[in-house]
Image (spheres, grey):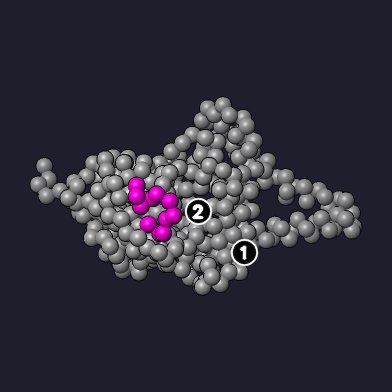
Amino acid sequence: MNENPYEPMVSVIIPALNSEVTIKALLESLIALDYRRDRLEIIVVDGGSTDRTREIAQRYPVRVVVETRRGINVARNVGVRNSCGEILAFTDSDCVVPRDWVKKIVEAFSDSRIGCLGGSVMRYEDDFLARYADESVMPVLRRFRRRELLSNVKPIFRYPAGCNMAFRRDALEKAGFFNERIRYGFDEDELVERVCRSGYLMLLDPNIIVWHKHRGSLRGLLKQSFNYGRGGGLIVRMGIKGKFSKWIILSLLSFLSWVVLCFSLLFLAASLSPIFLIPLLSITILPPIILLCFYAVKALSRGWRRQADILAYPILDLLRILSFSLGIIRGLLTSVENS
């Protein structure tokens, strides 16, 4: 029996803005955490809410800090600077955590090599868009299949989601805190990359989960994808070096190449010969067909009985790719000061 268990001080930091509809469920779940209360603090950083967010949060044994400057990374840094934990855990105001969330995070950090970690994000509700967010070939948020210990990020869905991540304080301070100029997507991922470059390992653990209330409308889903792209474009515009910058550039070049090729073939078909419609149709119709086949196979293997989902998912995938690419362009064209 271990007479001196590893029980570090843990600070849970929650950025919040106009979250009166969702924050109660999160705080109820945090109050029920299975971890020593004298080794746990919960900090809500309100970014200037105009609804009842602060009023609701103040009913609970949590610390509420008001920050008038906008931006999720601003709120995260304010939370860090107002905290005293050795371990800094982050979630969002539209999440719910299981009772063992902090305990599993602490168990992972008992390995001193780990500087940051991320867990899986599961849907809280079971409506159509929530299912799509989890089941898409491009998950809206991270959902890991196996436990991995990595020395650097891998941009294709192998990095933590901001609503389920944690840092060792020493690692975060060594890496230099969150970049407050990034106010959209990829707002936390660039920091994770810096933590890894500073000599720490990153853990991805599917057993550390939170439940997230995904976007409930198509407009909200596409706006989310657009903002992810916009944040990526800002990373490139600011000249931040790393794997994410390279991946963003590659993604945009691939999209633009496809658009140029489509218009070129359309022009050739109109001006020279209809035969150019054949390659045009192949590059416009083939992607959704491939996606349709992917989802059909996935449905068979998992026993889905939702044929409409199989037909709709490829369309949503393509709309998200379009929104993400337009977001990158917007980020590249937006000055950092006005971002």
Q: Does the magenta stretch include residue 48?
A: yes
Labels 2 & 1 near each other (Cβ < 8 A): no
Residue 155 image point, x, y percent: 49, 57
Residue 296 in which image quadrant: top right
110, 209: nearer the viewer: 209
Question: In which quadrant is the N terminus drawn?
Answer: top left
Q: Residue at x 49, y 34 (%)?
A: 126
Magenta span covers which residues? 46-56
Which SS class for mark 2?
A: loop
Q: Is residue 120 magenta?
A: no
Residue 334 image point, x, y percent: 58, 69
As drawn, which residue projects farthest toward the right? 272
Q: What residue type is labelled 1?
A: Ile
Q: Which amino acid does label 2 sit on?
A: Ile
Left/right placement of residue 160 relative to residue 233 reads left
- Residue 82: tell me if it is visible: yes
Left/right placement of residue 30 relative to residue 311 reads left
Residue 267 image point, x, y percent: 84, 58
**From what the image shows, is residue 32 above or below residue 189?**
above
Disc marking residue 20: none
Between discs 2 and 1, the one toward the N terminus: 2
User: Badge 1 is on which residue?
Assistant: 329
Q: How many labels does the image show?
A: 2
Which SS class for mark 1?
A: helix
Q: How far apart in space, not on screen, are marks 2 and 1 (Cα)?
A: 20 Å
Left/right placement of residue 312 relative to residue 106 reads right
Q: Residue at x 80, y 56 (%)?
A: 265
As drawn, which residue projects farthest toward the left? 3
User: Badge 2 is on which residue?
Assistant: 156
Q: Which residue is drawn at 61% across and 35% down?
A: 310
Q: Which residue is drawn at 33% across and 54% down?
A: 44
Q: Determine crowd level at label 2: few under 14, some 14-19, many 20+ residues with C-alpha closer than 10 A.
A: few
